[in-house]
Amino acid sequence: MTNSPRVVDMTLRDGMHAVDHQFTPDQMAEIAGALDAADMDVVEVSHGDGMGGSSINYGMAAASTEEYLEAVAPQLSDTELSVLLLPGIGTVEELDMAADHGADICRIATHATEADISQDHFEYVKERGLEANGLLMLSHMATPETLLEQAQLMEEYGADAVYLMDSAGALLPGDVRERVSLLVDGLDIDVGFHAHNNLGLAVGNTLAALDEGAVTVDGCLRGLGAGSGNTQMEVLVGALDRAGYDVSPDLYGTMDAAEEVLLPMLDDDTMPELDNDSLMLGYAGVYSSFLRHARREGKRYGVDPRDILVELGEMEVVGGQEDLITDVAERLAEEQGNAVEADD
């Protein structure tokens, strides 16, 4: 267990989901400057779905990744700059651009069971001289043993660290402990953890991960992010300080960045909230992108959208399989209709 965890702020990347990817370069620069003043270890910048994510499919950002990096990089002194790349979305050209604009770290994210698609990406990131971190998304969908196997592949490809991402906010503290401890014991590189708050457990799960040997953790100012958001950064810094960790980010500075810089940029619709919708995403274990479609098909077929989400979770669907929502809604409608007829 480390007493000095590395703290990564995701407000300018994962937080982009909450604002429909509409932070402007000037806003990013202002937020990044406040985070640097608060001695944040790392700031990550890109579209919410990583470099190349600005599209009709994933949502158009207010500016290009290059424009964001040009705005943010000059604001950072000791704080490192990270970018995200998802294989199949980001490109070599974008990796080159990020490296040329001062990125220190590239985080490469795959589904929890698809690390084998990332080898070329890790090798190229290392060739460009950047730190390479691997992210295993939707880690609740794989057994601890499978996650270790996937993490070992990333280590073999050149990863400097591997993160477990609780992308749906579905893990319980015991789940986190089991997964993180296995990776810590089975890898020769650092282990990180990224939490979402759909079950209200983001800070608790992050502390559990650190207890088991994770050395780097993520959060967003005001808890911005998809669903009910990420680990709330200013709360996390306070909790880590109270728990006796020696963290670089200054509590007051982080609080001020959230309250005085970020908050005036937001409206009520963008503030994360642990409501019934977010709860169901965590309970069912599915991406937030499924919620709107489940509501629509539930209304169309006369089915409770919560039932649709639970069914999708049991099917272990991933992003890109939203077309299955209609099939599930239609089948549930038929089953419930048959049940009503049987009762009659």
Image: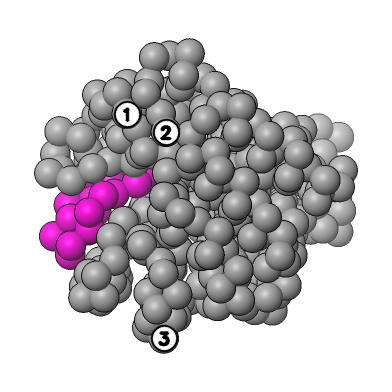
Q: Which residue is mark 3?
A: 93
Q: What is the CA distance from the residue labelled 1 to the residue labelled 3?
A: 35 Å
Counting residues from the N terminus, which is met first, the one under dot 3 or under dot 2? Answer: 3
Instruction: Tell me residue 129's x, y (percent).
Output: 24, 70
Instruction: Tell me residue 68's x, y (percent).
Output: 60, 70
**Where 26 sits versus 41, above or below?**
below
* Residue 164 magenta-highlighted: yes
Q: Which mark is residue 248?
A: 2
Q: Residue at x 72, y 32 (%)?
A: 274
Q: Which circle, 2 or 1, is nearer the viewer?
A: 2
Q: Which residues are magenta?
A: 146-166
Q: Residue at x 45, y 75 (%)?
A: 101
Instruction: Tell me residue 65's x, y (percent).
Output: 57, 74
Counting residues from the N terminus, which is met first, the one under dot 2 or under dot 1? Answer: 1
Q: Which circle, 1 or 3, is nearer the viewer?
A: 1
Q: Which circle, 3 or 2, is nearer the viewer?
A: 2
**Where 236 sits versus 19, above or below?**
above
Callout count: 3
Q: Does residue 10 show up?
A: yes
For badge 2, the amino acid type reads Ser
Viewport quadrant of the C terminus: top right
Instruction: Tell me residue 320's x, y (percent).
Output: 56, 67
For badge 1, the amino acid type reads Ser
Give neighbour class at mark 1: few <14, some 14-19, many 20+ (Cα, 10 Å).
some
Q: Residue at x 82, y 39 (%)?
A: 340
Q: Residue furthest bottom?
A: 93
* Residue 209 magenta-highlighted: no
Q: Which residue is mark 1?
A: 4
Counting residues from the N terminus, which is met first, the one under dot 1 or under dot 3? Answer: 1
Q: Secondary structure at mark 1?
A: loop
